[in-house]
Image (spheres, grey):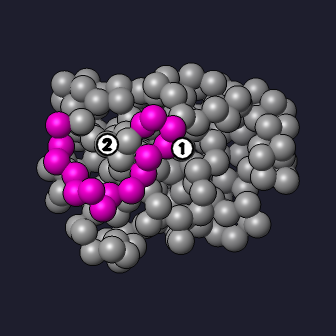
Amino acid sequence: MTKYQAEIVPLNDKQIGSSAHGTATFVEENDQLTITIEMFDTPANTEHWEHFHGFPDGKSAAIATEAQDANHDGFVDLMETEAVSGTTMVPFDDAPEHMDIPHDRYPVSDDKGHFSYTKVVPLPELQANFEKAFGSKDLQLDKRVVYIHGVPASLDLPESVAGMVGHFDAHVTLPIAVGKIEKVN
């Protein structure tokens, strides 16, 4: 068994009015990856896209901070995270092993901004799809970061906040929390 964990801290909290935080754990055992994420103080009653991001070349990803606000609009949007965190890799949705990212099958927070997510993923299928997308079966979890995204459509965002993915706008993709994944044992 190999275990990884991320302490998830707020991002864009001053702008969105809530300080999303929580933990993510990843346990690899017997050809399965068990993913558990628990979040608190996210925007309430909102769908939250969640993924791990990283660099396909194996470079270690870092969490984005306010320093990544390249256009100085007060928000760190999805595009601005890429310089330090890499690209979106694996979704934490109803079937992470399919690596299907833009859809509406992610967790929704309750009226207190809490949600809990647990999924047992067939590791061989995830690794095969990861290799097709990124050229390696090795997920290298300890070189990745977890992002939690999503704010209500009613939140006023400046036009400069980028993040359109398919027909999903920046309200869906705006990062609200991030954590570095580290090997526990």
Segment colored magenta: 154-168
Which one is in front, 41 or 66? 66
Task: Indicate the position of residue 169 as horizontal and vertical percent values.
Answer: 38, 42
Helix, strand, or loop for circle 1?
strand
- Give the crowd class for mark 2: few <14, some 14-19, many >=20 residues within 10 Å: many
Q: Residue, x 53% and y 65% (percent of image)?
A: 82
Give left or right: position of 74 versus 101: left
Q: From what the image shows, is residue 154 above or below residue 93? A: below
Q: Is residue 184 visible?
A: no
Quadrant the N terminus occupies: top right
Quadrant the C terminus occupies: bottom right
- Give the crowd class for mark 1: few <14, some 14-19, many >=20 residues within 10 Å: many
Task: Indicate the position of residue 71 as horizontal and vertical percent values.
Answer: 33, 74
Circles 1 and 2, Cβ within 8 Å, touching? The answer is no
Give amino acid for label 1.
His
Cα gap from disc 1 to disc 2, whole angstroms: 16 Å
Q: From what the image shows, is residue 111 above or below residue 7? A: above
- Quadrant of residue 155 in the image? top left
Q: Which residue is mark 2?
A: 171
Q: Which residue is mark 1?
A: 51
Question: Which circle's residue, 1 or 2, is located before the other in the chain?
Answer: 1
Helix, strand, or loop for circle 2?
helix
Task: Indicate the position of residue 87 as horizontal and vertical percent values.
Answer: 60, 57
Q: From what the image shows, is residue 4 above or below residue 129? A: below
Give left or right: position of 76 versus 55: left
Residue 73 lies in magenta, yes or no?
no
Task: Indicate the position of residue 38 as horizontal and vertical percent values.
Answer: 40, 36
Q: Residue, x 24% and y 36% (percent of image)?
A: 153
| Magenta portion: prevailing SS class | loop
Q: Is residue 80 visible?
A: yes
